[in-house]
Image: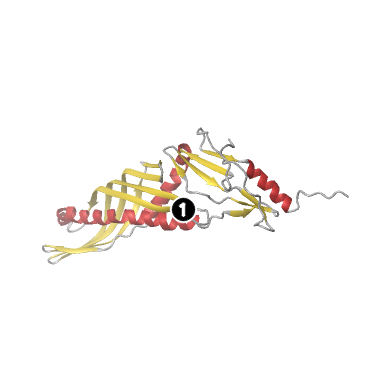
Amino acid sequence: MCPSGVAQETGPACTIRITSSGLDLIRQEGLNFVAEELENITIPELSGKEGNFHYNIRDVRIVDLNLSSAALLFHPNTGLCFQVHNSSISITFHRKLFYWLFHDVGQVNASADGVSFETVLMLGRNAAGRLKITNMTCTAAISSLTAQFSGTLKSVYQIMSVFLTMGIRFLLNKQICPVLSHAALVSLNTMMDTVPVRTPVDKYVGIDYSLLSDPKVMSDRLDMDFRGMFYPLENENETLAYRGVVPVVKEMNRMLHMAVSEYFFDSAMFAYYTANVLRIQIP
């Protein structure tokens, strides 16, 4: 920890740095979250007519995702970038085909290959001092989709497979970014809104660790400045005036670094003193 900087009227007493190695630690959790969201993709029913063929595709479901080639990176001056390249998605759907007097129904297994998408999460803070995803950009593409048809009209399906799989691939590709956008801007933000920014330490004092500014993101790190101020629980507005210096983190060799200024400790002593914990009466 390196408490140094320029004195300010108000400012942070605690700075936290997350490095690239720290980001690698949470990559798997992010991957699991993305996989769960993608499994909830819903594809609208696909019906139509091609010549004498009447077809209906419904109940398209994702049953397996292989997102092993995923990366979570810092996006300078913005936030985080989540990339998936050349992955695959296994899906099933129900088919119906009418051709003259023939009627064929059944389930089809299909595989979408060359699945790639990239999302950039723009990080900021809300009015309460919580971390917030302020916006998101997304691009997605699926290289190919192949289906394994069986049944009475298997040969007919093979003729139509290119047409049908192109339609399903188009619909599936259109759903990826909206699902990820909802996951980031709604689900994640809702979850982060439940994180407290002021909490009791014991029965005498509490601590305010609200985020004071938008995160500062470089290519290899993310720095966040927190208030880091203690206060007496009986009078939360009675706090020590800020006279500290901004803590600065210089290290990069660990997953996470934290620096605190003198104000962090001074406000704790002031809060306990105000709460009559450090006062001694001499008879």
How many residues crowd mark 1 within 10 Å: few (<14), some (14–19), many (20+)?
Answer: many
Residue at (30%, 46%) from the top-left corner?
Answer: 116
**Residue farthest to the right?**
283
Quadrant assignment, res 172: bottom left
Assign the N terminus to one quadrant of the image. top right
Depth check, front residue: 83 or 96? 83
Q: In the current view of this chain or complex, which residue is farthest to the bottom?
A: 101
Q: Is residue 204 above or below residue 12?
A: below
Three-letter amino acid code at the position of disc 1? Lys
Occupied quadrant, residue 57? bottom left
Residue pointed to by mark 1: 132
Residue 149 seen in the current view: no
157 or 226: nearer the eye?
226
**Which residue does the image show at 17% across and 55% down from the upper left?**
163
Relative placement, left or right, of 201 versus 224 is right
Q: Nearer the viewer, residue 21 or 63?
A: 21
Report the colour scheme.
secondary structure
Q: Is 268 placed left or right of 51 in the picture? A: right
The answer to whether one can see residue 186 in this image is: yes
For residue 169, side relative to residue 128 (left or right):
left
Q: Position of residue 276 (x, y in %)?
A: 76, 53
In percent of width and height, residue 221 lies at 46, 39
x and y percentages locating residue 125 in the rendered image: 48, 52
Numbered circles on residues, count: 1
Q: Residue at x 44, y 37 (%)?
A: 220
Per the image, label 1 sits on a secondary structure element best described as strand
Location of residue 136 in the rendering, given as x and y in whole percent from the top left corner = 37, 52
